[in-house]
Amino acid sequence: MSVAENMKTHGGRKLHDGMIKSKKTRTEDLIIAGICFLLMLVCLIPMLHVLASSLSSTGALVRNDVFIWPDGLNFDAYQKVLAEPKNVRALGWTAGLTAVCTLLSITLTICAAYPLIYPNLKGGKLISLFFLLTMYFSAGTIPNYLLLSSMGMIDTPYVLIFPNCISVFNVIIMRSFFYGVPDSLREAAEIDGAGPIRVLFKVYLPLSLPVIATLSLFYAVGRWNGFSDALMYLTPKGEAYYPIQLRLYYVLQNATNTAQQAAQESGPSQPGLAKTVQMATVMFATVPILLVYPWLQRYFVTGVTIGAVKG
């Protein structure tokens, strides 16, 4: 066989193998895309059902005719939700509370994680051990309540801010990211006369936007969705500090009373109004935090993969 024929044969084999691999890759991509699409539907359909229920007529809800598309479009439920001053006030209060808690939490997380990257920090290993112990052992609900009560924090906004203002797990993530920053950058800044604070602001923080955005999102979602601490530490005396999720909790808990009140106010022709109000309240409390994701998505994808690959 001549050299030209040999090259042609080998070239044909490579082309054939490449086509097989290309078809296999496309098949795998289609399978992965199909799985992702199914997972998306699993997450999206319940939300669409709640939205459709909140926009449907009460008669359609009573007949169970609503799935993911509104039946008898109306906005009466949203008008009732927005007409309740407590709901609007709770939404505004929760938004401000979330912003304050997120800023405080990410600041404390950075302050806790940054010193631990210095190998010459005295007691650094012991401090890290203390941090880890708090992940496995806690005093419990009753001691926490007694402590906060003795500090005069019950029925105050501080009880929603300070007790859970830092997460040890997030501190570990932040420290791991700081470890990934080349030491040569820190050493170069120190040679130029920069101290630890300046190194933090000039070297580490500019390179840490992905992890900061990711952890900020974690803190914000946790605070926005949190209601157990408000349920335990806020009595009717502190109703002015009820977050939106606690208001939603009471709306769902008192569904029977709400239905009776709706029947008295709207008459027997709208027996399902209470359910539409519940669904509208759910959307009212959920949509604002969902709007945050698109702004942080590009950072979030990078941040959640931090530490996944080690060189």
Image (tube, rainbow, N blue to C red):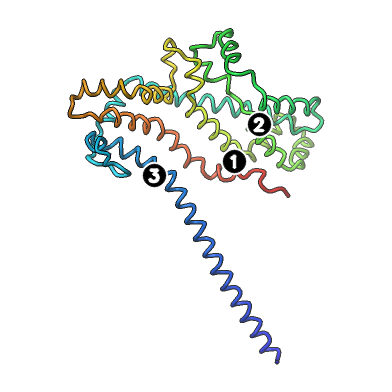
| First reached walking from the N terminus: tag 1 or tag 3 | 3
Residue type, label 3: Ile
Residue type, label 1: Pro
SS at mark 1 in the image: helix
How many neighbours does mark 2 have within 10 angstroms: few (below 14), some (14-19), or many (20 or more)? many
**x, y (%) of residue 234?**
47, 15
115 vs 76, left or right, is right
SS at mark 3 in the image: helix
Residue type, label 2: Val
233 vs 305, left or right, is left
**x, y (%) of residue 308?**
66, 46
Q: Quadrant of residue 12?
A: bottom right
Residue under label 1, please give it.
Answer: 210
**x, y (%) of residue 207?**
64, 40
- The residue under the point 69% across, 33% down is 200
Q: How many marks?
A: 3
| First reached walking from the N terminus: tag 3 or tag 2 | 3
Residue under label 3, please give it.
Answer: 45
Q: CA distance from mark 1 to mark 3?
A: 30 Å
- The residue under the point 41% across, 44% down is 44
| First reached walking from the N terminus: tag 2 or tag 1 | 2
- The residue under the point 61% across, 26% down is 166
Residue under label 2, please give it.
Answer: 171
- Nearer the observer, disc 1 or disc 3? 3
Q: Are marks 3 and 2 in contact (CB under 8 Å)?
A: no
160 vs 278, left or right, is right
